[in-house]
Image (cartoon, rainbow, N blue to C red):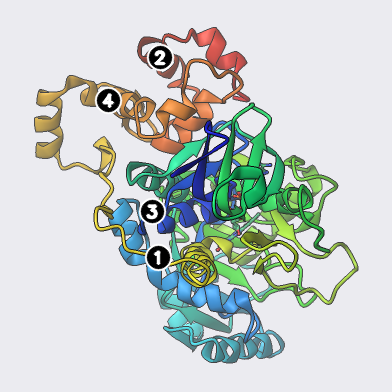
Amino acid sequence: MDFLYNTTMIYDIIIIGGGVVGCAIAHEAVQYNLSVLLLEKEADVSEGTSKANSGVLHAGFNVPVGSLKAKFNVDGLKYFPKLCNDLQIDYNDCKKLVIAKDDKEKKTLVQLYEQGLANKCEGLSLIERKQIQSLQPSLYNGHDNYSGPAYALFSEKTAIVSPYELTIALAENALLNGATIKTSCEVSSIEKLSTEDTGIPEDCFHVGTTSGFSAGGRFVVNAAGLYSDKVASLIDSIDLKIYPWRGEYYILEKKAVELVDMAIYPVPPSDGGGLGVHLTPTVHNNLLIGPSAEFTDFPENLENTIPTMRQLLNEAWEMVPGLRGYTAIKNFSGIRSKLFGPGTSSGFEDFYINESPNIPNLIHIIGIESPGLTGAPSIAHHVIENIIGNRMDLSINSRFSYKRIRPVRARDLSNSDFRSLTERDPAYGEIICFCGRVSKGEIRDALHSPLSGEVFSSDKRGIGILNAIKKRTHTLMGDCQGGRCLSRLLHVVEEELGITAEEVLNDSDY
Ligand SMILES: Cc1cc2nc3c(=O)[nH]c(=O)nc-3n(C[C@H](O)[C@H](O)[C@H](O)COP(=O)(O)OP(=O)(O)OC[C@H]3O[C@@H](n4cnc5c(N)ncnc54)[C@H](O)[C@@H]3O)c2cc1C
């Protein structure tokens, strides 16, 4: 690492944005002997689009042949079994059915199937009523005027992960392998400095943030998601604009996975309006209904609207009438980064992943809507190996450690393992969240986990402590949504961080 003007560190790579893409790039970069800085404007990583999506690892049949979306989707999917094992996060190969009611809809299934084959997706087959019924009987029960799907495209390789657990795990592992991660650091300026300015033998960037922290970088990677066009405009003039496209969801109580334990999609709408409202199990055994698809004026507009929420339920009940008997425990929204606005395109725009045509060593990653979660590991590999690796020699970091230690999950343990754990440390036997069976020990671990120095640091307020604990432990996310555990949880935070319950609540949108 060099120093700029004797004070500011110069990193090999500065990554702007701690979503799944930025964190995957940091995780990839530290596998080489590169110094890496990741800057995130929020107090925690995974606070943007990577926090709120379906969590589906797509097979790759929904995206046009020859597109970057197809390339990174199909390639990205292959990384996940090993990556999730290395990072010790849950991976569930739940599989997927795209269902068609009749011969007209079957034509779309055949097109998707052929597109999938051309994209080299594995594990696809077209199936009919009998096989569909044996895979997911609830699709056939309780309909009034319809006897259930006649055809389906079955995808054996579709899987699910928790998108925020993945992002946090990538960031933690990057941090433990040498990356520097700074949260609450919104990048507000990027300048290119010449060798005459700096006295070091190559041009570099100077990146400033609203927190006052600044650093130098040989490469800057703009992975700022919904704000990547704004970050680009701090230094560059590329003609791309993000149009926020909201997707609203319901989360159903855990029992709903008794009826639906694989991803169920309708045939996608012909207007290019997303993949249609679908049913997706989560790795925590809830069931998601959604997302809707509507343009919004600004990226923070995460509201849930009554007409859309009604539409979600109606479409879910039409696919699986038995879901009427299950309770929705929460709703939420996520926002996609579209590169076209309402009525301005035929409905497809590819990812933009390029070195700037105007400024060498500045890499823009823009328009990473679905399948960006699935594609993230492959995008990261491409950015480091092909774009940065083209410009500088990369040598392997022989000290890189792939394995992340899995946080203790009391609910996953056998009775005997649970007993011996609680004998060693009784805090793991003190259950705070009964819905998710989360113990005091697990919350304590989260409050002291690798990113805690940034996320829970005492000089920060407005950080959403409860939100950060939720993402790490799954407490407050059960059927009671905190009704039974909040006061006990606040007590643990007070004990561990010395922050009063009142301060924590003032600091959260809970
Ligand atoms: C409703 C919905 C459903 C989806 N479903 C799926 C799916 O099932 N499967 C799939 O593969 N993909 C899915 N996606 C797409 C996937 O979620 C995204 O492609 C992915 O999360 C994008 O990650 P990202 O890192 O580019 O963006 P983000 O997660 O938004 O990260 C960008 C980060 O940059 C930060 N930032 C912004 N400006 C600055 C700044 N000036 N300085 C510092 N930091 C800054 C932000 O705070 C944010 O944390 C879905 C998306 C949505 C919205």
Hey, what amino acid is under mark 3?
A: Val
Q: Which residue is mark 1?
A: 394
Q: Would you call the spot at circle 1 few (<14 residues within 10 Å), some (14-19), or many (20 or more)?
A: some
Asked if marks 3 and 1 touch (Cβ < 8 Å), the reply is no
Please name the residue shown 42% across and 75% down the image: 157
Residue 109 left/right relative to 3 = right
Asked if marks 2 and 1 touch (Cβ < 8 Å), the reply is no
Of tags 2 and 1, the one toward the viewer is: 1
Dot 4 lies on which element? Answer: helix
Hey, what amino acid is under mark 1?
A: Leu
Q: Which residue is mark 2?
A: 497
Which mark, by number, is residue 441?
A: 4
Q: Earlier in the sequence, mark 4 or mark 1?
A: 1
Q: Quadrant of the C terminus?
A: top right
Q: Would you call the spot at circle 3 few (<14 residues within 10 Å), some (14-19), or many (20 or more)?
A: many
Q: Would you call the spot at circle 2 few (<14 residues within 10 Å), some (14-19), or many (20 or more)?
A: some
Please say whether residue 101 is visible from this viewpoint: yes
Which mark, by number, is residue 52?
A: none
Please name the residue shown 70% across and 64% down the image: 356
Please name the residue shown 75% across and 61% down the image: 338
Q: CA distance from mark 3 to mark 4?
A: 30 Å
Residue 258 spot, x, y in % from top left: 42, 56
- Nearest the viewer among 136 and 231 is 231
Q: Which residue is mark 3?
A: 30
Asked if marks 4 and 1 touch (Cβ < 8 Å), the reply is no
Asked if marks 2 and 3 touch (Cβ < 8 Å), the reply is no
